[in-house]
Amino acid sequence: MLLEVNGLTKAFAGLVAVNEVDFTVQKGEILGLIGPNGAGKTTIFHLLTGYYTPTAGTVLFNGKDMTRVTPPAACRLGLTRTFQIVKPLVQLTVLENVMVGAFAKIGNAKKAKELALEILEFTGQLACKDMLAGNLTLGMRKRLEVSRALATQPELLLLDETMAGLNSKEIADAVKLIMKIRERGITLVVIEHVMKAIMSISDRIVVINYGKKIMEGCPDAVCNDQQVIQAYLGADYAKR
Ligand SMILES: Nc1ncnc2c1ncn2[C@@H]1O[C@H](COP(=O)(O)OP(=O)(O)OP(=O)(O)O)[C@@H](O)[C@H]1O
Ligand SMILES: [Mg+2]
């Protein structure tokens, strides 16, 4: 098992944002993580990558306890995430942004640049390598976030709503890119509200509601689950 999450819990003052969540991720898999706004999905990514320390529970990555690691250490161990709110270094070019990712594991500028160029070709962003990141469209910024994460050479990549705000052509391209990333040998956990996309890419889906896992299964089973329909659309809809 690549990732094992057991009893993961995060309490903020007056609110349990993540409540005893268990799930596993196998090598080579794409796991979808869905749930209504505020369900606790992003908090789970913060907990897996050391941005938050869990109140309770354990995270094992390749058998190693991750519950006390810092984000840079998680990244060096092969566990990298993107951010829901994209934060490119706006004063740097696209290439330089991706080189920053590459420096997570590479100390040499020439080698970091080589890897960054290879990643930009892979993600289809080579043509804009010299543009300032601050001048990119939202779609390109979202993709740059993925490029930068890939340059850290992750074994497990966590994508947080990389399709939010994209048009349908950009969503179709993002779906293709995720499938290509998996073919590259990288395992993925993907948070996404674009249902059609998440259902088409995921091998398995975990559904979170009010901090708790309410369902886990293949996309078809999740779509037809009454509890999931109720969480998303309300009790009235579920009864129909
Ligand atoms: N640092 C924090 N302090 C207090 N409450 C927080 C903090 N971070 C998140 N929360 C709360 O935890 C809950 C879960 O938030 P989270 O961002 O994980 O949800 P989400 O599932 O990613 O939602 P969305 O789909 O809108 O991105 C929310 O109620 C949020 O307000
Ligand atoms: Mg979120």
Image (cartoon, rainbow, N blue to C red):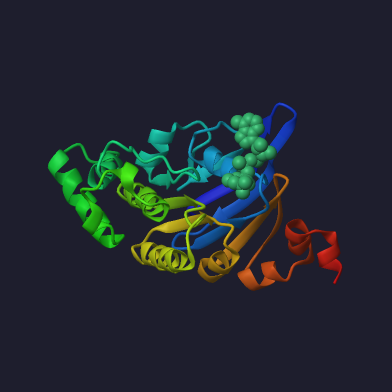
| Figure check: 143 above or below 12 | below
| Figure check: 159 above or below 74 | below
Determine the residue located farthest toward the top in the rendered image.
13
**Quarter where residue 112 is shown:** top left
**Quarter where residue 134 is shown:** top left
Say which residue appears at 32% left-offset and 49% top-offset: 153
Residue 1 point in image, percent of width and height? 50, 55
Total marks placed = 0
Q: Nearer the viewer, residue 213 or 4?
A: 213
Residue 219 point in image, percent of width and height? 62, 69
One can see residue 110 in this view: yes
Residue 216 point in image, percent of width and height? 66, 61
| Figure check: 216 above or below 104 | below
Residue 3 point in image, percent of width and height? 51, 50
Q: Quadrant of ligand 1?
A: top right
Q: Nearer the viewer, residue 160 or 55?
A: 160
Q: Nearer the viewer, residue 70 or 163?
A: 163
Q: Is residue 106 left or right of residue 50?
A: left
One can see residue 56 in this view: no
Q: Is residue 40 left or right of residue 86?
A: right
Query: Which quadrant is the C terminus positioned in?
Result: bottom right
